[in-house]
Image: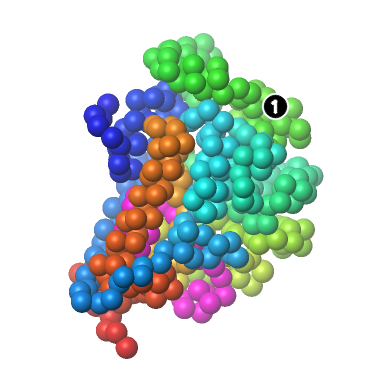
């Protein structure tokens, strides 16, 4: 356990490790296969150095931005995290409340513990909602209607889950496996965390999938629900289904899980308002390129047609600066906010997000830029990328 006050994402990650049962921490922390993509996601942002500039008037640095029509204190949204309500007591509602306090968008996962209604009641701002294409299109349509009724105007639709990735950490804990041995292993891991038992297991009830509860009877049994979800992943989904979705969703539409320029162009042609440039946090295809390494490949024309958000491995306000300089309009973060909430509650999440905003402001000042809109490739340099000259 770290001593002193947590500051960085790494600090909160260690606190989360000590507070969560091992199977929950590894569910949050792990990736697919040997986790090559998971590691590259984080390390590849450092390939670009921030170009330091001096003697420029930076007395009025402003981190405010706009993401898909939503005014934000900085160009950052909280990504959907499944089971966040098991990481902290009523975790989704807590995260939405903190995000609203800081004027940031929060995205509720379809497989969150808290319901849309609970999150709407906790937040003073409209939240975003994340959805998968399930085999049962009736459930999809019902969720869209319910989201609109709760004031959701931005749908984050995950498209990179035709089949679930192979996550070895989950398998080692017996997740998805029947039998006494797997159950006893998880019971032992829970008993090793008495504070979590009191705060979350006992104090955070009910433990059901709140968004799906009225539609899916299995949503009240976590083990039964896992089996149901696996039958609902639809490997036959194509762009035709996105057309169907676009016709039924009148609000803003973000397609999450795009990592190819041709797919991004197709998304724009079908009327998506934006994409999340993402490899699912390294949790799907191990060996896929990192989000950072491919972000510069998106054309300027696509950036004019789509809002580009990027996720995967961002760990500081400096990484947010890098993402903006490489062409993103904003970023999404998942694990960092979940680590902070699990490790130090709402206060920890507030502190971490506030730190990221300060880090972004410091980067802007020391790079000689005062507005988010003015950040560009001229503010970066790397061994493989020459410094761009100012015009």
Judged left or right of residue 215, residue 106 is left
Q: Residue at x 43, y 18 (%)?
A: 195
Q: Is residue 275 magenta?
A: no
Which residue appears farthest toward the bottom when viewing the image? Answer: 391
Instruction: Establish if 319 lies above or below 372.
Output: above
- The image quadrant that residue 378 belongs to is bottom left
Q: Is residue 321 magenta?
A: yes
- Label 1 secondary element: helix
Judged left or right of residue 314, residue 268 is right
Q: Residue at x 40, y 72 (%)?
A: 371
In the rendered image, residue 39, in percent from the top left (x then y), is placed at 32, 47
Which residue appears farthest toward the front when viewing the image? Answer: 59
Q: Residue at x 30, y 41 (%)?
A: 7
In the rendered image, residue 51, in percent from the top left (x then y), is placed at 23, 70
Q: How crowded is the residue under tag 1: few (<14 C-alpha within 10 Å), some, or many (20+)?
A: some
Q: Residue at x 66, y 36 (%)?
A: 118
In the rendered image, residue 135, in percent from the top left (x then y), is placed at 71, 44
Quadrant assignment for the N terminus: top left
In this picture, which residue range is highlighted in magenta? 299-322
- The image quadrant that residue 382 belongs to is bottom left
Quadrant assignment for the C terminus: bottom left
Q: Which residue is mark 1?
A: 218
**Can residue 84 be spotted in the picture?**
yes
């Amino acid at each position: 356990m770290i001593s002193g006050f947590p500051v960085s994402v790494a600090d909160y990650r260690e606190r989360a490790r000590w507070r969560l049962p091992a199977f929950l921490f590894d569910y949050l922390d792990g990736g697919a296969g040997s986790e090559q993509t998971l590691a590259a996601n984080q390390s590849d942002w450092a390939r670009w150095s921030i170009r330091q500039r001096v003697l420029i008037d930076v007395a009025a640095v402003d981190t405010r931005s706009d993401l898909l029509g939503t005014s934000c204190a900085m160009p950052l949204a909280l990504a959907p995290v499944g089971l966040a309500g098991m990481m902290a007591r009523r975790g989704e509602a807590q995260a939405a409340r903190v995000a609203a306090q800081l004027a940031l968008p929060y995205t509720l996962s379809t497989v969150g513990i808290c319901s849309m209604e609970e999150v709407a009641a906790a937040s003073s701002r409209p939240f975003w909602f994340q959805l998968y294409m399930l085999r049962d299109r009736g459930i999809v349509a019902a969720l869209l209607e319910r989201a609109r009724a709760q004031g959701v105007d931005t749908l984050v639709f995950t498209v990179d889950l035709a089949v679930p990735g192979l996550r070895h950490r989950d398998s080692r804990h017996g997740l998805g496996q029947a039998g006494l041995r797997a159950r006893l292993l998880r019971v032992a891991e829970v008993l090793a965390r008495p504070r979590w038992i009191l705060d979350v297991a006992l104090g955070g009830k009910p433990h059901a999938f709140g968004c799906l509860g009225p539609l899916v009877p299995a949503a009240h049994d976590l083990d039964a629900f896992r089996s149901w979800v696996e039958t609902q992943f639809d490997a036959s989904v194509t762009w035709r289904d996105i057309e169907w979705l676009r016709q039924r969703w009148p609000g803003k539409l973000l397609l999450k899980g795009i990592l190819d320029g041709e797919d991004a162009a197709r998304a724009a042609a079908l009327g998506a308002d934006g994409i999340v440039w993402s490899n699912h946090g390294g949790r799907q295809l191990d060996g896929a390129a990192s989000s950072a390494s491919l972000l510069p490949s998106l054309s300027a024309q696509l950036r004019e047609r789509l809002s580009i958000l990027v996720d995967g491995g961002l760990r500081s306000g400096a990484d947010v600066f890098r993402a903006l300089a490489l062409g993103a309009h904003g970023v999404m973060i998942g694990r960092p906010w979940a680590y902070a909430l699990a490790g130090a509650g709402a206060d920890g999440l507030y502190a971490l997000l506030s730190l990221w905003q300060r880090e972004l402001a410091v980067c802007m000042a020391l790079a000689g830029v005062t507005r988010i809109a003015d950040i560009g490739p001229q503010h970066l340099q790397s061994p493989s990328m020459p410094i761009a000259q100012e015009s």
